[in-house]
Amino acid sequence: MKIISVVGARPNFMKIAPFVNAIHAHNETNLATKIDHTLVHTGQHYDDRMSKSFFKALGIPEADINLGVGSGTHAEQVGHTMIAFEKVLKDKKPDWVVVVGDVNATCACSITTKKENIQLAHIEAGLRSGDMTMPEEINRLFTDRLSDLLLTPDEISSQNLFKEGVSFDRIQFVGNIMIDTLESNMLKAKNLDICEILNRNRLSMNGQTTEVGRLQSGQYALMTLHRPSNVDHRSIIEPIVSFIRNELVEAIPLIWIIHPRTEKQLKVFGLWDSLLKTKNLHILKPLGYHELLRLNIDASMMLTDSGGLQEECCVLGTPCLTLRWNTERPITLEEYGGASVLVGNDVGRIQHAFFDVINKKRNPHRPDLWDGHTSNRIIECLLNSGL
Ligand code: UD1
């Protein structure tokens, strides 16, 4: 069987790593059903810290093909990817293309695959936020509508697909592949030292003002923010920054890991310099997988608009304020046993939830099949697909 798998942006890398490993493990012991695998990187993310460092840390072999698409508008990214990926498909003629997640690379390669009449499998199918202003929601809808094999992380996602009219035989509930990565990297992460992570990655120089001991013993909040809906408008980001400077860091030290988009926007709005000078606020460059996991393991609380972090907080039990009005991952919410509450981007709501959650205990929760063995189930599904 000939498979091409596709990655493009940072959240894809943690999802492809266990899949690639599972193919290698399969090929070592099953010569008769050996999988001929090609890894394609569209190049949507290209900075070392957004891409190469994850390949290295997670042991992903260098991509066989890099389409070099880079940044641009959505149409530019999708269009350039489709043009370049079509050539790859015509040349390689795979039996299956496997896409992961919901980034522009996922959507672009899905459309191209079906136009070439090739079978398409989607890892992380069926997630729905219902929010059509999210580019990722559009990518999810396209990808799932076109996929022949829809590999879902939880039963809610399977139900979403069924309600949309996808036939049962195309839906396979396999569990969450991100948790395969979490499980196999936990030990390595635990061995890292929090202060070293801070010192290596710090953009602000205010570490001196925080007792290092407090950070070491896990008394800190952790934050990531990158969605255009949160960082692209001054009217949204400015009040959040004021809350952080005036209230949050007075209550607990904050480690804020900055996405390139967010740094750029904070500079545009003239908020960057004051943040760098804020006491008890540690602004860090984008972190490697193990470094972020290490900080999450001991954080008192997470504030994030990332999808993957909601899932990791669920399994680790880190109380999580999700700075969004909706989530495609409801299974991570408190009402389903998870650690996350939706707080949107209204400061009053964030403030209220923050003081509510600040003394909450960890509550680890593991949804069904978030067991570290999802990639093996996916390989089985592909091998049993009749090709
Ligand atoms: C993309 C995904 C989003 C995911 C996020 C994780 C889509 C629609 N969005 O958003 O779902 O949560 O990745 O990061 O696919 N940039 C760099 N270096 C890089 C890459 C980007 O500096 O290596 C900067 C560029 O200024 C670029 C901006 O970040 O314009 C945004 O990058 P882009 O790939 O368009 O989207 P993300 O916001 O990263």
Image (cartoon, helix red, strand yellow):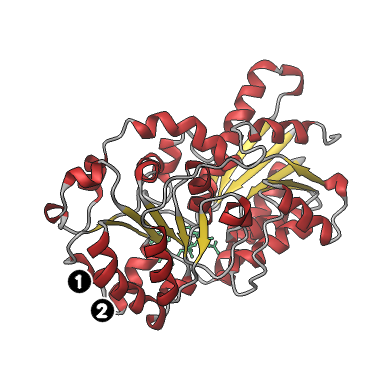
Does mark 1 have its CB less than 8 Å from ligand 1?
no
Residue occupying the point 38% across, 30% down: 188
On the image, the x and y values in percent for residue 119 come to 79, 46
**Image height check: is 319 above or below 247?**
above
| Residue 273: image tag | 1
Residue 162 in view here: yes
Does mark 2 have its CB less than 8 Å from ligand 1?
no
* Number of residues whose C-alpha sits closer than 10 Å to that of mark 1, classed few (under 14), some (14–19) or many (20 or more): few
Judging depth in this view, the residue of 108 and 286 nearest the camera is 286
Task: Give the CA distance from mark 2 to mark 1.
Answer: 7 Å
| Residue 270: image tag | 2
Q: Indicate the quadrant where residue 280 lies.
A: bottom left
Residue 275 falls left or right of residue 74: left
On the image, the x and y values in percent for residue 296 come to 39, 45
Q: Quadrant of the C terminus?
A: top right
The three-letter amino acid code for the residue at tag 1 is: Asp
Q: Are marks 2 and 1 in contact (CB under 8 Å)?
A: yes
For mark 1, give the secondary structure: helix
